[in-house]
Image: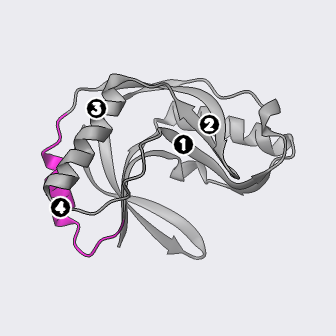
Amino acid sequence: MRLFIAIRLSEDLQTSVTATMHSLKKAGVKGSYVPSGNLHLTLAFLGEVQDRAPVQEALQAVHFKPFRLSLSEMGNFGDLLWIGLKGNQGLSGLARDIRTALDSAEISYDRAKFVPHITIVRKAAGKWKTVPAPRGEMMVRKVSLMKSEQKDGKRVYTEVFSIGG
């Protein structure tokens, strides 16, 4: 199964990001828009995993205090359009602690540098810089282990485990 560790967006943040996505569509930005229910912040991408039990054990070793997450600017990696998040010690510490726990358990994951962002459009084309970035913030109290699968030609993300509360 294909797994990743993420922070799921609060309803308010999801609404704010979705409104910006509608504004991008109205501004003529084309591409593959992420369904609002799939919006998230990836902390670690694991890829194909045979048994999720060791991942769950590793996550249980991670303890964090709730912290505030705030949206910042929009940006891009090539044709991938994203919304950034204001850097803070809670977020960077959580990402570091999760990766340390995965390393200790010898669990493989994508070791790309952690750049906190929420992907909103893949294969984006158009003048997205004319659309203002969304505003919003949320308290992070939970981290989710997510399963990614194709269903009826669409990518579906399902929480299979979580820490925090």
- The magenta span reads 47-63
Residue 83, picture quadrant:
top right
- What amino acid is found at the position of numbered circle 3 in the picture? Gly
Quadrant in the picture for the C terminus: top left
Q: Which residue is mark 4?
A: 106
- What amino acid is found at the position of numbered circle 2 in the picture? Val
SS of the residue under disc 3: helix
Dot 2 and dot 1 residues touching (CB under 8 Å): yes
- What amino acid is found at the position of numbered circle 1 in the picture? Ile
**In the visual, does 107 lie left or right of 125?**
left
Q: How far apart in space, not on screen, are marks 4 and 1 (Cα)?
A: 27 Å
Q: Which residue is mark 2?
A: 17
**In the visual, does 15 lie left or right of 138?**
right
Question: Is residue 96 one of those drawn in magenta?
Answer: no
Question: Is residue 51 one of those drawn in magenta?
Answer: yes
**Viewer-proximal residue among 49 and 19:** 49
Residue 110, given in percent of the width and then of the height, sits at 38, 58
Q: Which mark is residue 93?
A: 3
Q: How far apart in space, not on screen, are marks 3 and 4 (Cα)?
A: 20 Å
Residue at 80% x, 45% y is 25
For the question of whether residue 140 can be seen, the reply is: no
Residue 61, given in percent of the width and then of the height, sits at 12, 45
Residue at 39% x, 23% y is 88
SS of the residue under disc 2: helix
